[in-house]
Image (spheres, rainbow, N blue to C red):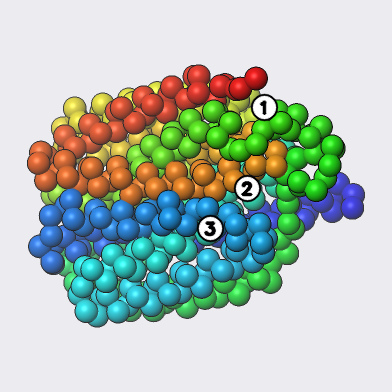
Amino acid sequence: MNNDQKSAKIGIALAFVGVLFFAIGFALGINSLLIPVLESELSLPSGVTYMLYGATFLPFILFGYPASMTIAKIGYKKTMALSFIFFAAAFALFIVSANAASFELFLLASFVSGTANTFLQASVNPYITILGPIESAARRMSIMGICNKLAWPIAPIFLSFVIGKSVDKTLVSDLSTPFYIILGIFILLGVLSLLAPLPEVKAAGEDEDAGDSAGDECAYSANKTSIWQFPHLLFGALTLFIYVGIETLALGSAVDYAKTIGLDNASRYAWIPSGGLILGYICGIIFIPKYLSQSKALVICSVLGIIGSIAIVTLPEAQSIWAIGAMGLGCSLMWPALWPLAMVDLGKFTKQGASLLVMAMAGGAVIPIILGLLKDSFTMQQAYWICLPCFAMILLYGLYGHKIRTK
């Protein structure tokens, strides 16, 4: 296969996986509208309603490793298709939950949706990382990030559009109609996943049957016996745990914050964090790796996140919501930088390393719940203080953590 044919094949793969990243963001973005609707109509405290994120991200811990074993058994492509079977079951449960107005059923539906997301994330993220050169992985991930973050604000806007009501007037019973539409779309995506021309890929040294040549391709991992001997991976997993939590908080709380401080048409503010993220991803596509390394991008974004965190708790309420955009900009290149920095030199442990990083995404279950609990005890604006130490921890990894190596 010549270079033109290879580039065309990779381009087709990138385009289709971009659609899958959009589906991931859309499924997660639904919670942005569910939380204020359930909190209002069912008279639930914020600490309880934010458990929807807990239910969505808990499966990453439970099924991260089984997902990697599934990939090893049936490959990336079939695992992507399998995830949409879980998504179909999840949205069928969402329909039942809306008709019954049951918060417990919504938690169950979110858990099943999170299981689907686990299998899909476990396949698409390492797939994009190793589809091309590792040094340009952040650029590919930035492109995927745009697809993903465009979907977050579209989800609550789509729900409001189909329902025909603003967030403050939406009833739980109104949600079943858009869920029927989403169910059909996700079933179609599952079929397309099986038919899509996606090549199976492997990282350098990943093929354990490759003999000595595999070790030569990845000398650092050649004599390792487990993923616990890669400190840059372990520190990276902890950092990813914190990052996913803080990004989920930024993306998922904007509508609730706008409603809390009394802004009209709260759903339109869902674009603020996504706009910041997309702007950052565009910068990543332009500057990485030619002008900016992945580690430097992580450092710059951490500093921007710290500035945004301070701004949101110190500015007047009406202006502070725009600081969520600065937090979104800070989060933008963290995902595309953290994955390749943590997965570099894993060789034959690439799939296991990827499963550990997928499990670390359970941070999305923890930090948003902490925000909800702080909101119940203080004001929601003051609850955003939780973001500051999180961005500081990510800065530490960008400066030092990714460089840690064993001899």
* Distance from Cα at disc 2 to Cα at disc 1: 28 Å
Where is mark 2, residue-wise? 351
Q: Amino acid at mark 3?
A: Pro
Q: Is residue 391 depicted above or below 125 in this figure? A: above
Residue 151 can be seen in this image: no
Q: Give left or right: position of 203 versus 175.
A: right
* Distance from Cα at disc 3 to Cα at disc 2: 11 Å
Where is mark 1, residue-wise? 290
**What secondary structure is marked by label 1?**
loop
Query: Which disc number belongs to residue 66?
Result: 3
Q: What is the x, y in percent for residue 393? A: 38, 26
* Distance from Cα at disc 1 to Cα at disc 3: 37 Å
Q: Give left or right: position of 366 versus 61.
A: left
Q: Amino acid at mark 2?
A: Lys
Residue 67 can be seen in this image: yes
Within the image, what quadrant is residue 188 found in?
A: bottom right
Within the image, what quadrant is residue 19 found in?
A: bottom right
Callout in the foreground (2, 1): 2
